[in-house]
Image (cartoon, coloured by chain):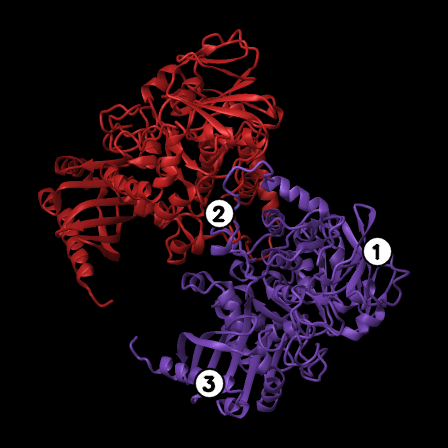
Chain colours: A red, B purple
Amino acid sequence: MLDTVPETEAGAWLAAFAGALARGDIAGTLALFAEDCYWRDFVSFTWNIKTLEGKPAIAAMLEARLADTAPGDWAVGKVTRNGTQTEAWFTFQTKVGRGEGIVRLEGGVCRSILTTLQGLDGHEEAIGARRAMGVAHGADRSRETWAERRAAEEAALGAGVEPYCLIIGGGQGGIMLGARLKALGVPAIIVEKNARAGDSWRNRYRSLVLHDPVWYDHLPYMPFPANWPVFTPKDKMGDWLESYVSLMELAYWGSTEAKRATFDPASGRWTVDLVRDGKPVTLRPVQLVFATGAYGPPRTISLKGADRFRGEVLHSSAYTDGSRFKGRNVVVIGAASSGHDVAVDLWEAGAKVTMVQRSATTVVRSGTLMEMAFEIYSEEAAAKGIDVDRADMIAMATPFALQPAAQRALYDRIRAKDADFYRRLAATGFLLDFGPDETGLMMKAYRTGSGYYVDVGGSQLIIDGEIRVKSGVEIDGLTETGIRFADGEEIAADAIIQSTGFQSMHEVIAQIVSREVGDRIGTCWGLGSGTKNDPGPWHGELRNMYKPLAHPNLWVHGGNLALQIKAREQGMDTPVHGGPA
Amino acid sequence: MLDTVPETEAGAWLAAFAGALARGDIAGTLALFAEDCYWRDFVSFTWNIKTLEGKPAIAAMLEARLADTAPGDWAVGKVTRNGTQTEAWFTFQTKVGRGEGIVRLEGGVCRSILTTLQGLDGHEEAIGARRAMGVAHGADRSRETWAERRAAEEAALGAGVEPYCLIIGGGQGGIMLGARLKALGVPAIIVEKNARAGDSWRNRYRSLVLHDPVWYDHLPYMPFPANWPVFTPKDKMGDWLESYVSLMELAYWGSTEAKRATFDPASGRWTVDLVRDGKPVTLRPVQLVFATGAYGPPRTISLKGADRFRGEVLHSSAYTDGSRFKGRNVVVIGAASSGHDVAVDLWEAGAKVTMVQRSATTVVRSGTLMEMAFEIYSEEAAAKGIDVDRADMIAMATPFALQPAAQRALYDRIRAKDADFYRRLAATGFLLDFGPDETGLMMKAYRTGSGYYVDVGGSQLIIDGEIRVKSGVEIDGLTETGIRFADGEEIAADAIIQSTGFQSMHEVIAQIVSREVGDRIGTCWGLGSGTKNDPGPWHGELRNMYKPLAHPNLWVHGGNLALQIKAREQGMDTPVHGGPA
């Protein structure tokens, strides 16, 4: 406990780092880094989400941004040593706000550093000690009560008072951003095509349950209660979101669809045509955020002979109720998450299910993943003070370039632990893989968001032969009564569910803004790893996610954009280092 | 920091205490106590809420309860020294569950000790690491989804399946108890005469805001969000309660009134006749809880000549909207909390208000109270890990007998700080007091629940003459157009609001169960202090609150009854030491 060596090492490094930065001494700063080094920045230096890889990239960033950022007040927090690596949390101050970060030292120099902007000075979130009083004490004949003020604000916003920010999509992403902006005092409206908040969950298939545990899923300011289940059932998630929207007092327009959005560079405002409760409404926000989910529109494959098929063909996103397929033959095309979930739901409803697997799938058992990959998102971590914000910081502190090695090691352990399970699953003909470079589920998620399944029961049905798998054989086409394969086999089908995934989010932008803008922005997610469906060049970050795009005042939401939007609302200078995407 | 003396002192004392108890050595145990000593127990030793005052009372309790309680596994937690007093938190184990407590030592012996039962072994709350999984992984053709299970439970409970516990009253008290029982797996129904949870707040007067700060008001399992206001406006409180009921999945019957309850000693069950949505329903719970608020029915005073008065007379509990009194003369009878709140609300609505003060009032400014009396319920305390549960423990650790001295000292400081304010208020003729023994607001609250006001603006209106005060003169009666006093003055009145308080909660029991049972139970709240309206003998605890009453299977809720009810549901032996009230 009194071994102060890591603390001393971290303190000395941070002091030297602070000194070099304060002197504007870029060479001196670089001397504190290892040759193979990474500086990951969330907004604090770059007004971007950016990993600078290697000394030349770090030097270029500092040349461009150091003077303007003017960092100071560096202070070391918690320090730990893991093997040869010393990890130190720290705080700092920039010209515009307060920052927090994590540095990892090896041999006295920095292997990787994370810097994040946590708040803008003078624009702190109205929480904790800064929360509203709720009442102005003292009698006041012009008093507006809370209920009256809320009603007046709701009536005015979007009907005379323009929102600064319009959020298209009222699932958890849009709702979270709305809550953050509310706490920062940024007028925002969330529009959602479903009637009530939470309907995007309620409307899904019967057995849907979140695959991530509760510790991973918290929303800002109001964590899930202590008695919340580990895996949230879809309708309960719907109820949570609906209560959350009400309690956070968000301007949430249900039954509202965004039809078209046009940007006017001269005024810096969007014109967004909406249909709300069947009536046209036009809003003119400054910022436009697409929070329409991690994916874009459904991706369907064209099936030869579909016109002659007498059964039903639908995409998994339109599948809600298995009961009408009871006793029927159903073919599910696709063997990733939605393919498995739909197949299990159909089986539970009493259908005879065949899963068509077109390419290999990464499967990890839920229990194993919980045990081996969620240490920092767990009851034990929470008890040690690692809440979801702390855990996210820890996860963020590892640059993407260094993740494959760690993930590969994790999957070596997972494959060893569940060797028997994998052997039995493979014996059914199911094609297993662990990614193009054996890095497993999470890297697939980052790179393509597809090709994996967290097993919550589907694999056992496959092992038991309850769900038949047809793997690795091209689909030839449909017949009147089924589906025919290149190997000549024909499988009878009353219905075909295409669990073939989704297009990129930028296709939603293409639909609502324009094809040209959609294409200019390009694919969302993906790292440029050069692996299948994630073409290079290497980006080092997730493409287009929660950072400036190749179009002004336009954002794709998959994280926390609130500070970036607040800074712009305040007219701050926000030069984006390293360009978009 | 390395001064271990308090830790050593506390550790030695607890070890000696544990040893004496383990040997059944009551004399040896008493030797560890000061002459003027107090043992306050919440359920763990006594199955009661009881303060044993002095060695003979402690000896009697141990004679009766030590063998059966079989306490052990005593362990010291946090220890602090305040002046000559050493305070130590500790945990222990009884035959049925785990306990926690706080001991305060002076000169090496115990001045006061608090012991509380925190959980029943084998019946722990389903929270944290014990939370539900939310899904049974694995495919299952008989799967019942969360939504289906909830719907089935809701349909069955009270219609075939009897609740173990029926809670009459669905305000925050009944709701909290419902949530605790749910976490303990005790089937319960909450019935509430208003349509929706939260309506008991929404239906009150326009400007109502909680007088206690957010840190004091948390409900179990789901604390208020970080952005919740300090003082919750009534409609926002209503929304919170409504969301809470939904998210906690409570069986909550709105629009339901309890008409009559009869206990059958033979079966140990109640027969409760209810009217739900206009239709009669009968329930047969084992336990019946009245959670109808801190007070009973309105207390009205009879006013001579009321029949000839041409204006309106109503009780403050029926006052909701001041706007219809704009420009009118309104007399508010009563000068405590509701009298002030109603007077301010009327003034804000533009009425001409006179407050009739019949006896002296304890007034404390809200800001002063927040600053000087809520240290342990504050953002600063929460940041130090003192959440509402910790803070309640600290508050509970001081026996009632020792509170007057501390409160008197607090009010000496408050009176010094706000001397100018009190001087100006008194100058208006407003009668101020600080209780019969100068102990201030909190002791009045415990003793009679009346006669005080946390000033949130009313006093300034009185000081400014905006609200006129008529003090200390008997009301002679009403005339056709106003109210006449014993000094001959007549004040014109279009309306008279009786802010004259409420009867004791046992009057509600008398209405629904029987006069005889109501009288057997007697007054709720009060300590038996022998001061005005709190007749002796001294009880040392709040009469009838959250503990067994003088009638089996009947409870008045003002705290947390859940463990006591769970123990009975499990058929545990629960001999109540010290009898009811």
In the picture, measured across the screen, residue B564 lies left or right of residue A9, that is right
Q: CA distance from mark 3 to mark 2?
A: 42 Å
Query: Which residue corresponds to mark 2?
Result: A230
What SS does tag 2 mark?
Answer: loop
On the same chain: label 2 and label 1?
A: no
On the same chain: label 3 and label 2?
A: no
Question: Residue at point 56% right, 43% down?
Answer: A243
Q: Chain of mark 3?
A: B
Does residue A559 appear in this view? no
Query: Which residue corresponds to mark 1?
Result: B311
On the same chain: label 1 and label 3?
A: yes
Does residue A373 appear in this view? yes
What SS does tag 3 mark?
Answer: helix
In the picture, measured across the screen, residue B525 lies left or right of residue A120, that is right
Q: Give the position of the N terminus of chain A as an image quadrant.
A: bottom left
Q: Chain of mark 2?
A: A
Residue A403 image point, x, y percent: 26, 39
Q: Specify which label sits upstream in the sequence, 1 or 3.
A: 3
- Amino acid type at circle 1 is Gly
Circles 1 and 3 in contact, beta carbons < 8 Å: no
Q: Quadrant of residue B544?
A: bottom right
Kindly identify which numbered label has been placed on residue B19.
Answer: 3
Between residue B497 and residue A211, name the one nearer to us: A211
- Amino acid type at circle 2 is Val
Kindly identify which numbered label has been placed on residue B269.
Answer: none
Circles 2 and 1 in contact, beta carbons < 8 Å: no
- Amino acid type at circle 3 is Gly
Q: Quadrant of residue B488?
A: bottom right
